[in-house]
Image: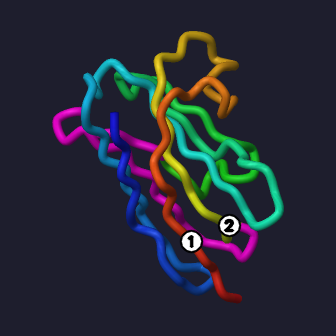
């Protein structure tokens, strides 16, 4: 299973970005997907997640209202739309894939079996 994240970059505060993560090597439509981020010297934190159908989404409190996760099962791709970027959003963003059941499992990086290489998002003020 391979995950390829892209879409990061150097942006200004207030700008928007859309991150993408393409999954290959397994049945994407049956897999839950999540986005996590890791700032220098900090742990990998949960950002957003989506179940296999796209019918359920979950967000960290810090990003609610600015971030939107979505998926296109026909393209084996999950997206993270980020609006009103803030300097605190600067981090490497990772996408993860796994077979998840309970709501609580979506929030834990340990429950995701596969990870992409990460894409850097840097927000200048």
In this rendering, is residue 119 above or below 70? below
| Precedes in sequence: disc 2 or disc 1 | 2
In this rendering, is residue 80 above or below 57? below
Residue found 59% across the figure and 71% down from its top = 84
**Label 1 Cα crowd, 10 Å radius (few <14 / some 14-19 / many 20+):** many
Q: Which residues are magenta?
A: 69-88
Image quadrant occupied by the C terminus: bottom right
Give the Cα distance between marks 2 and 1.
7 Å
Inspect the magenta stretch and tell me whether residue 124 lies in it.
Answer: no
Image quadrant occupied by the N terminus: top left
- From the image, tell me which residue sits under label 1: 121
Which secondary structure, mark 2?
A: helix
In this rendering, is residue 63 above or below 3? below
Q: Please report contact status of discs 2 and 1: CB closer than 8 Å, yes or no.
A: yes
Residue found 45% across the figure and 48% down from its top = 116
Which is in the foreground here, disc 2 or disc 1?
Answer: 1
Residue found 66% across the figure and 34% down from its top = 109
The answer to which image quadrant residue 111 occupies is top right
- From the image, tell me which residue sits under label 2: 89
Inspect the magenta stretch and tell me whether residue 71 lies in it.
Answer: yes
Query: As drawn, which residue projects farthest toward the left?
Result: 74
Q: Position of residue 104 (x, y in %)?
A: 69, 19
Would residue 92 appear left or right of 68 to someone viewing this image?
Answer: right
Residue found 50% across the figure and 49% down from its top = 68
How was this image coloured?
rainbow
């Amino acid at each position: 299973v391979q995950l390829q994240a892209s879409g990061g970059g150097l942006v200004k505060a207030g700008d928007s970005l859309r991150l993408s993560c393409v999954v290959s090597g397994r049945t994407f439509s049956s897999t839950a997907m999540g986005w996590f981020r890791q700032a220098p010297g900090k742990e990998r934190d949960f950002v957003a997640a989506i179940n296999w159908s796209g019918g359920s989404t979950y967000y960290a409190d810090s990003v609610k209202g600015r971030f939107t996760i979505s998926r296109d099962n026909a393209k084996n791709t999950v997206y993270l739309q980020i609006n009103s970027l803030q300097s605190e959003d600067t981090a490497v963003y990772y996408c993860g894939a796994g077979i998840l059941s309970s709501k609580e499992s979506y929030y834990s990086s340990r429950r995701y079996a596969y990870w992409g290489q990460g894409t850097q998002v840097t927000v200048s003020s």
